[in-house]
Amino acid sequence: MRLPRFLMPRTVVSAHCDLPCGVYDPAQARIEAESIKAIAEKYAANTDPEFRTRAILIKEQRAELVKHHLWVLWTDYFKGPHFEKYPQLHQLFNEATKLAGASGAKGSVDVAVADQLLGKIEEISKIFWETKQA
């Protein structure tokens, strides 16, 4: 069923989210990745099975948040000119989200994996702040 003509929108607009705030910062991903690292360290230092189970669940939630924050930057903040100026950017995001995912920090309690994730986020952050200054 089609809407009557008088109910059809006169102007069609689009935005990258429900409320285009324009506030982006890789710090959100970094904070969650720091949490992953801290949890991995606490996991290694504690043998209580209930604690370890809770730690893994929380770490996996934080890993999902890292991926979310990275994807928002990748898909909403960075635009064509950024990718032209920084051709490594797609690869950096791919590597970072994989390090946050099941084959990375989400599926591991290895502190070294969390450090690798933090390193990729730092590389992305440097580029991000360079683009903000331009």
Image (cartoon, grey):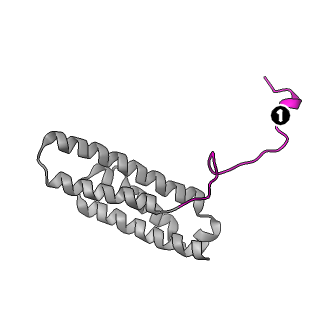
- Above or below, 123 relative to 43: below
Element carrying mark 1? loop
Q: Position of residue 109 (x, y in %)?
A: 23, 53
Question: Looking at the image, can residue 52 be seen?
Answer: yes
Q: Nearer the viewer, residue 45 or 97?
A: 45
Q: Residue at x 59, y 57 (%)?
A: 76
Number of dots carrying numbers: 1
Question: Looking at the image, can residue 99 be seen?
Answer: no
Q: Residue at x 44, y 62 (%)?
A: 27
User: For this view, does 118 lie left or right of residue 5?
Assistant: left
Q: Position of residue 134 (x, y in %)?
A: 62, 77
User: For this view, does 32 lie left or right of residue 12?
Assistant: left
**The quarter of the displayed image where residue 53 is located:** top left
Q: Residue at x 17, y 39 (%)?
A: 50
Q: Main secondary structure of the magenta part?
A: loop
The residue indicated by pointer 1 is 8
Q: Which residue lies most toward the left here?
A: 47
Magenta region includes residue 37:
no
Amino acid carrying label 1: it is Met
- Quadrant where the N terminus sits is top right
Q: Residue at x 43, y 58 (%)?
A: 29
Q: Which residue lies most toward the right here?
A: 6
Magenta region includes residue 12:
yes
Q: Position of residue 19 (x, y in %)?
A: 63, 48
Magenta segment boundaries in residue numbering: 1-24
- Above or below, 67 relative to 91: above
Label 1, residues with CA under 10 Å away: few <14, some 14-19, many ≥20? few
Q: Position of residue 38 (x, y in %)?
A: 26, 57
